[in-house]
Image (cartoon, rainbow, N blue to C red):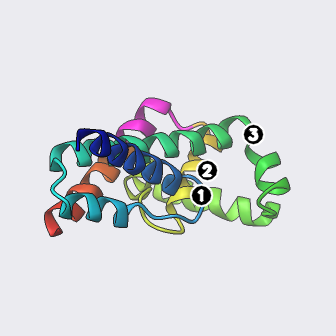
Amino acid sequence: MEFLAEYSYLGLFLSSFLAATLLPLSSELVLGILLKQGANPHLTLLVATFGNVLGSVVNYGLGAFGGRMILHRFWRIKEPEIHRAEKRFRKFGVFSLLFAWVPVIGDPLTVAAGALHVNFTVFLLLVSLGKFLRYLVILLAI
């Protein structure tokens, strides 16, 4: 049984990680299934948060080190769209990173933070707090 539990947490980590990248995935279902099967709620909260934050760190790195080239070449995002996203980010400031968990806008927000070279420590703290609180609310709802 512990063998399966280890892989369950690995699956949660991977789904949380991939859900935080620019891939259109979700980790809530995996989290819910694990909790319904009696998984340790504290461990699931930590694993899901860590995986999701790590995925956002990858996005930050893409923005910081490959930014426009990646956005243009692979995601086919045009320069005016990038300027609008950066303008929105500057308008609402770094505290908008608390909402990096929000579907559709969260992933580009973390890429924009990297492209704008937001202080990494501030980025990590705000993104971690927002994602932790999101998973905590989901955990409490289940």
Mark 1 residue crowding within 10 angstroms, few (<14) / some (14–19) / many (20+): many
Give the image quarter of residue 59: top right
Q: Is residue 32 above or below residue 124?
A: below
Helix, strand or loop: magenta stretch? helix
Where disc 1 sits, the SS reads helix
Q: Magenta includes 124?
A: yes
View extreme (right): residue: 73
Tags 2 and 1 touching, CB below 8 Å: yes
Q: Residue at x 27, y 56 (%)?
A: 135
Mark 3 residue crowding within 10 angstroms, few (<14) / some (14–19) / many (20+): some
Residue 47 appears at what percent x and percent y? Answer: 32, 42
Mark 2 residue crowding within 10 angstroms, few (<14) / some (14–19) / many (20+): many
Give the image quarter of residue 73: bottom right
Tell me how far mark 2 sits from mark 1, CA to CA: 6 Å
Provide the residue designation for mark 3.
66
Where disc 2 sits, the SS reads helix
Q: Residue at x 43, y 65 (%)?
A: 102
Provide the residue designation for mark 2.
112
42 or 71: nearer the eye? 42
Residue 7's tag is none
Quadrant including the C terminus: bottom left
Residue 84 appears at what percent x and percent y? Answer: 67, 65
Provide the residue designation for mark 1.
108
Would residue 57 appear left or right of 70 to someone viewing this image?
left
95 or 104: nearer the eye? 104
Q: Which residues are magenta?
A: 118-126
Where disc 3 sits, the SS reads loop
Amino acid type of the residue tagged 1 in the rendering: Pro
Would residue 78 appear left or right of 47 to someone viewing this image?
right
Tell me how far mark 3 sits from mark 2, CA to CA: 11 Å
Amino acid type of the residue tagged 3 in the rendering: Gly
136 or 123: nearer the eye? 136
